Image (tube, rainbow, N blue to C red):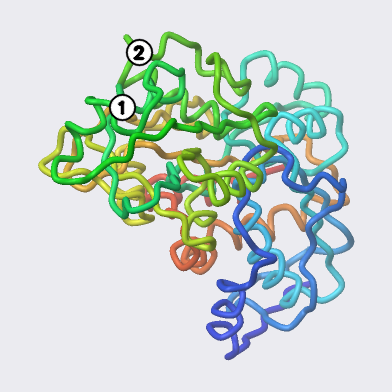
C-alpha cells in the first residue's frame, strides 16, 4: 500500500518542537533511566513526502541517544503520515543498541561507533545470509560546555583540552589557557571537569579527536569507557550538562543542543586555522564533508578527519549510524524498516537535522545510503 500525505503545518510544528524541553538532544549513554521508550506522541504533523509503501505494524529500534532528538522528530512526522504504523526507538546507549540488535530484539540499532569486527561476526547469527552494516544517518558537533563567571568567550586547543580532562591542568588561570585567551581575565579558580559515567560513543569520539590531535597528552585508546584519571562523572549527556550548568568552574562534553537549549556557553577550538572555530552545525558539516567511506561492500562506515585545519571546520564531531542487516531482515518488519529509513535519509529528513542543531550527512555519502536502504532484503 502506498500512502502519501501533505501537511502545511510542518514548519510550525517543527518550530514548536525546537523549543520543546522534552526534545533535548541526549548523549550516547542512558539518559532515560526509567527504561521507557521514545515514540512519536500525538500524530499532529506529517512529512510532506513520505512513501509508506508496505509499512505496517510496529518497528522496534534502540541505541544511541545522541540521535534521540532527530529520532523524536522523524518518528513523529513519519507516524503522522503512515496511519497505523508505530515506530518505537528506545534511547539507551550505542552498546546496548548493538547488543539488542545482535540478539534479534530490534529491527535496527543506533550507534555512534561503527560495528567492531567481532560485532559484525555476531550479527551473522540474526542476519540470515547476511550481516550487520553501518548506515551513517546523523552528524553533529561534540560541544565543550563551560561555566565560568565573567568569561563569555573561551578558546582552547587539543593539547590543552587533553590536559584539562586528564587532570594535568587544574586551574582556569593556567598559563596554557591564558595564552589562548589573551585579553580575557581568567579567574583563579579550580577546574571541575565532568565526563560520562557509563560507556558512551560520545566519549569514544572525543577520545578519537584527542588521540589524533594531542597524542602526547592523551595516551589512551579511544574506547567508550572513560579512560583518564580524575574528574567527576555524571550519567548521560543530560547529567553532564546539568552539572556544567550548576557548577561554577565546570567544563564537560555533550551534543550541541544541550548547550543551546540551556544557554551553556561553548568552547571554540584553535585548530591551527586562521581563527578558532565555534561549535556550530555549519562548522561541523565542513568537517564531516571531508569524511571517507572506509567500509566495504554495503557497509558505509566513515573515517573522519579529526585533525583537519580547514578554515571554519569544527573537528570534534560524531556520526551516528543506523545498524541494519544487509540481508536477512525479518519479513514482517522489512517494509516498515525500508520505508522509515528512506524518509530519514531523504532530503526532507536530513533538512530536519539542519533545523535542530545536527549536521546532515554529505550528499555524496547520503546517496549511497539511500541506494543501500533500497536494496535491503
The circle drawn on residue 217 is 2
Residue farthest left in this picture: 274
Q: Nearer the viewer, residue 306 or 218?
A: 218
Q: Quadrant of residue 19?
A: bottom right
Q: Is residue 66 left or right of residue 290?
A: right
Residue 193 spot, x, y in % from top left: 50, 31
Secondary structure of the residue carrying tag 1 is: helix
Q: Which residue is mark 1?
A: 158
Give me the residue at 87% from left, 38% from top: 105
Name the spot of residue 148 as percent of width and height, x first. 40, 47
- Few, some or many C-alpha atoms within 10 Å of disc 1 (few <14, some 14-19, many ≥20)? many
Could you tell me how far apart the alpha carbons at marks 1 and 2 are, in whole angstroms?
A: 9 Å
Place of residue 370 in the rendered image (x, y in percent of width and height, measured from the top left): 53, 51
Quadrant in which the C terminus is drawn: top right
Q: Is residue 17 above or below residue 231?
A: below
The answer to whether residue 255 is seen in the rendering is yes
Vertical relation: 173 (above or below) 68: above
Give left or right: position of 352 versus 308: right
Q: Which mark is residue 204?
A: none
Mark 2 surroundings within 10 Å by alpha-carbon count, few (fewer than 14), some (14 through 19), many (20 or more):
some
Label 1 or label 2, whichever comes before in sequence order: 1
Amino acid at each position: 500500500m502506498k500512502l502519501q500525505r501533505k501537511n502545511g503545518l510542518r514548519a510550525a510544528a517543527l518550530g514548536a518542537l525546537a523549543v520543546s524541553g522534552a526534545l533535548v538532544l541526549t548523549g550516547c549513554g542512558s539518559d532515560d533511566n526509567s527504561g521507557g521508550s521514545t515514540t512519536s506522541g500525538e500524530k499532529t504533523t506529517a512529512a510532506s513526502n513520505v512513501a509508506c509503501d508496505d509499512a505496517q505494524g510496529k518497528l522496534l529500534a534502540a541505541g544511541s541517544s545522541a540521535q534521540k532528538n532527530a529520532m523524536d522528530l522523524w518518528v513523529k512526522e513519519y507516524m503522522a503520515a503512515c496511519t497505523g504504523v508505530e515506530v518505537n526507538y528506545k534511547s539507551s546507549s550505542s552498546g546496548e543498541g548493538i547488543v539488542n540488535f545482535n540478539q534479534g530484539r530490534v529491527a535496527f540499532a543506533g550507534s555512534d561507533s561503527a560495528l567492531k569486527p567481532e560485532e559484525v561476526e555476531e550479527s551473522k547469527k540474526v542476519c540470515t545470509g547476511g550481516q550487520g552494516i553501518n548506515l551513517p544517518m546523523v552528524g553533529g558537533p561534540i560541544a565543550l560546555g563551560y561555566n565560568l563567571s565573567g568569561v563569555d568567550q573561551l578558546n582552547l586547543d587539543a593539547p590543552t583540552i587533553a590536559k584539562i580532562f586528564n587532570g594535568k591542568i587544574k586551574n582556569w588561570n593556567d598559563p596554557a589557557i591564558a595564552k589562548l585567551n589573551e585579553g580575557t581575565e581568567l579567574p583563579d579558580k579550580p577546574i571541575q571537569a565532568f565526563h560520562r559515567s557509563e560507556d558512551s560513543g560520545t566519549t569514544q569520539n572525543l577520545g578519537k579527536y584527542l588521540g589524533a590531535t594531542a597524542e602526547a597528552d592523551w595516551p589512551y585508546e579511544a574506547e567508550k569507557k572513560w579512560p583518564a584519571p580524575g574528574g567527576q562523572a555524571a550519567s548521560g549527556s543530560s547529567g553532564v550538562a546539568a552539572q556544567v550548568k550548576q557548577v561554577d568552574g565546570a567544563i564537560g562534553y555533550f551534543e550541541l543542543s544541550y548547550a543551546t537549549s540551556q544557554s551553556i556557553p561553548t568552547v571554540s577550538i584553535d585548530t591551527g586555522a586562521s581563527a578558532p572555530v565555534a561549535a556550530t552545525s555549519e562548522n561541523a558539516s565542513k568537517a564531516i564533508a571531508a569524511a571517507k567511506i572506509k567500509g566495504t561492500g554495503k557497509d558505509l562506515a566513515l573515517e573522519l578527519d579529526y585533525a583537519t585545519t580547514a578554515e571554519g571546520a569544527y573537528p570534534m564531531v560524531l556520526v551516528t549510524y543506523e545498524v541494519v542487516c544487509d540481508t536477512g531482515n525479518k519479513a514482517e518488519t522489512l517494509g516498515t524498516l525500508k520505508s522509515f529509513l528512506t524518509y530519514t535519509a531523504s532530503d526532507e529528513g536530513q533538512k530536519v537535522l539542519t533545523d535542530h542543531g545536527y549536521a546532515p550527512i554529505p550528499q555524496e555519502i547520503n546517496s549511497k545510503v539511500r541506494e543501500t536502504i533500497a536494496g535491503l532484503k
